[in-house]
Image (tube, rainbow, N blue to C red):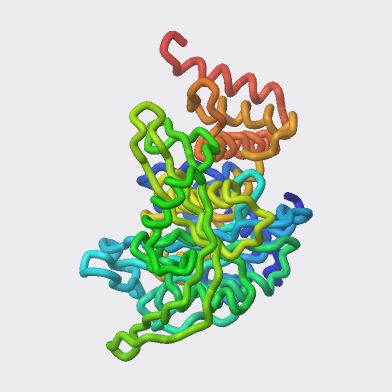
């Protein structure tokens, strides 16, 4: 972690401030907080506010500079792995009541005001562990802000953002092969052909009403599912939990062809765009209630991933897509309380989001390190957090962030008093004096 944490902002004071800000985000922040927490070593909280404002306003502190430590960390974590999942998703950052944010944009309706964030999060294809944010686009009233050198044009819709992000990810030269994982929004014949033609691997969830060619006939997915069911093609793979209920996953696969023209909206008109036939693998993943036999969930997954990856693994990879939803939750309410941030521009918001993302990467790295040293450290952090875990459950990112902050504050204090045992004893005596029964 030591090397990946480095950043070059052309100024030693800026580099030092970056590290302090990351530490300030290693904390489970209360939902009333408007800024990062104040380190013990800082005696004037107002000074932290001013330093933070100057940091985000500095021209040398760009999104491109702030994302580089995250990318370096991802390079280290991906080394030696054949595939890594590059999960793409969008999230609305709502700030309707934050009138100081003058570049907030109205999205779907008059109450949907804020910023539209698109993020790319690498996830381990082996374990499903999230790694670190490596790209972000943020739509504002003034256009797009981005970690890319060239921002998108203002009129780019969601799917038009994907190919530039795929290209930028390829240019990072991560030591692995990326599989881009996207939800149902990505089920667009035009874009699937576009991504496939440029050689990018993808895994998306298909829409149930899609028409495809299978065994020489035009059919929809449910007909393929019924036929495979009648042929006993579904294999029971693993026990899962869905919405708190136990279930058993069943998997089947089929080779399909997308050969219909794509439809596009051009100048307000729907036009058809012919294209090459696209051969894909359809993986159907169903979750069955083991008691009633009812179907609890069905996924129709489309992929051009090579056949050395089994259909069962494809379904598991798509399940790992949930990590990016957990990342958004960690930013919004699970830890960082992003919806309460008071920065007054999308640019400052994006910069702070990248700093907070480094804090997330730190705690994920700890959370998924199975070494004896790490396991013991996590136990200590949970105790310091004051939280209690359910028996048999692993520590959550939120509990580790809370405990980590306490440890960092404690170490700052011990450094300040030069580990003076007498001072610690005096502190304990004073503390005991004011406690009930003291």
**Quarter assignment of residue 154:** bottom left
Give the number of marks.
Answer: 0
* Residue 238: x %, y % from top left: 54, 36
* Residue 179: x %, y % from top left: 61, 62
Q: Residue at x 58, y 23 (%)?
A: 427
From the viewer's perspective, is residue 392 above or below residue 172? above
Left or right of 358 in this view: 297: left
Q: Residue furthest bottom?
A: 267
Does residue 303 appear anywhere in the picture?
yes
Q: Nearer the viewer, residue 125 or 46?
A: 125
Q: Residue furthest left?
A: 110
Q: Nearer the viewer, residue 262 or 336?
A: 262
Q: Residue at x 57, y 66 (%)?
A: 135
Does residue 353 appear anywhere in the picture?
no
* Residue 123: x %, y % from top left: 60, 53
* Residue 27: x %, y % from top left: 52, 43
Q: Residue at x 22, y 69 (%)?
A: 109
Q: Nearer the viewer, residue 354 or 127?
A: 127
Left or right of 73 in this view: 240: left
From the viewer's perspective, is residue 95 above or below residue 417? below
Q: Residue at x 34, y 69 (%)?
A: 101
**Quarter assignment of residue 103:** bottom left
């Amino acid at each position: 972690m030591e090397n990946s944490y480095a950043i070059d902002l052309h100024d030693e004071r800026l580099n030092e401030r970056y590290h302090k800000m990351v530490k300030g985000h290693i904390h489970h922040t209360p939902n009333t907080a408007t800024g990062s927490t104040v380190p013990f070593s800082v005696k004037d909280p107002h000074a932290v506010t001013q330093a933070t404002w100057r940091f985000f306003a500095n021209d040398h502190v760009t999104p491109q500079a702030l994302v580089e430590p995250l990318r370096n960390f991802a390079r280290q974590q991906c080394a030696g792995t054949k595939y890594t999942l590059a999960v793409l998703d969008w999230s609305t950052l709502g700030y309707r009541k934050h009138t100081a944010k003058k570049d907030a944009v109205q999205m779907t309706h008059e109450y949907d005001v804020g910023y539209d964030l698109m993020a790319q999060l690498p996830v381990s294809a082996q374990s499903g562990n999230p790694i670190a944010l490596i790209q972000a686009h943020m739509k504002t009233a003034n256009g797009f802000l981005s970690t890319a050198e060239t921002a998108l044009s203002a009129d780019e819709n969601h799917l038009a953002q994907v190919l530039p992000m795929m290209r930028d990810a390829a240019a990072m030269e991560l030591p692995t092969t990326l599989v881009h994982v996207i939800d149902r929004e990505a089920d667009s014949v035009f874009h699937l052909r576009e991504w496939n033609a440029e050689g990018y691997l993808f895994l998306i969830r298909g829409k149930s009403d899609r028409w495809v060619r299978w065994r020489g006939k035009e059919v929809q997915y449910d007909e393929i599912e019924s036929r495979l069911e009648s042929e006993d093609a579904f294999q029971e793979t693993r026990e899962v939990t869905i919405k708190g209920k136990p279930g058993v996953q069943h998997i089947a696969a089929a080779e399909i062809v997308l050969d219909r023209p794509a439809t596009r909206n051009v100048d307000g008109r729907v036009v058809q765009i012919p294209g090459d036939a696209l051969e894909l693998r359809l993986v159907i993943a169903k979750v069955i209630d083991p008691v009633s036999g009812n179907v609890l969930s069905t996924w129709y997954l489309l992929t051009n991933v090579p056949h050395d990856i089994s259909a069962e693994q494809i379904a598991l990879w798509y399940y790992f897509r949930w990590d990016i939803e957990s990342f958004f939750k960690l930013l919004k309410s699970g830890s960082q309380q992003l919806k309460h941030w008071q920065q007054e521009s999308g640019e400052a918001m994006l910069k702070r989001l990248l700093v907070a993302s480094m804090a997330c990467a730190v705690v994920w790295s700890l959370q998924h390190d199975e070494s004896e040293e790490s396991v013991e450290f996590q136990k200590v952090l949970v105790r310091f957090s004051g939280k209690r875990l359910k028996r048999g459950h692993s520590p959550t990112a939120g509990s580790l962030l809370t405990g980590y902050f306490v440890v960092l504050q404690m170490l700052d204090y011990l450094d300040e008093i030069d580990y003076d045992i007498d001072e610690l004893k005096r502190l304990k005596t004073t503390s005991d004096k004011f406690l009930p029964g003291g």
